[in-house]
Amino acid sequence: MLLATQLPRLFIMVGKGQEITLIDPNPQWSPQAVLNFYSANYPILTTAKISAPVIKDDAVQYRLETVIGTKG
């Protein structure tokens, strides 16, 4: 019997040389909805961009990359 399982999603906040892993608050939300949810606690995410998902370490990872404070 073949069973399909859904990989967990992780959201990695990237900014100022740091990476913070955020858990998925609701697997049914879109990545943009998760970004909006976390921007209440992390205001720097209001200008973040979501990268394409990557499967790594048995999870689907999205990078939330902030663009504030970068020049050029």
Image (cartoon, grey):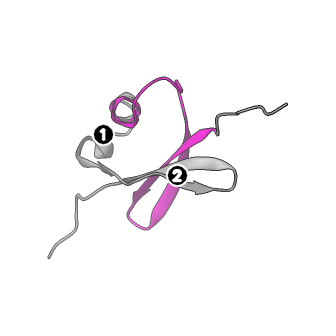
| Left or right of 3 in this view: 37 | left
Residue 26 percent across, percent down from the top left:
52, 24
- Determine the secondary structure under disc 2: strand
Residue drawn at 23 percent across, 47 percent down: 47
Spatial CA distance of label 2 from label 1 is 14 Å
Residue range highlighted in magenta = 8-36
Q: Which residue is mark 1?
A: 43
Residue drawn at 64 percent across, 34 percent down: 6
Residue drawn at 71 percent across, 33 percent down: 4
Residue 2 percent across, percent down from the top left:
79, 34
* Residue sitting at the far left: 72
Is there a contact, CB below 8 Å, between mark 2 and mark 1? no
- Up-down: is 26 above or below 48? above
Q: Which residue is mark 2?
A: 20
- Up-down: is 21 above or below 69? above
- Determine the secondary structure under disc 1: helix
| Left or right of 42 in this view: 20 | right
> What's under tag 2, amino acid-wise?
Ile
Magenta span includes 35: yes
> What's under tag 1, amino acid-wise?
Pro
Residue drawn at 58 percent across, 54 percent down: 55
Residue 48 percent across, percent down from the top left:
29, 49
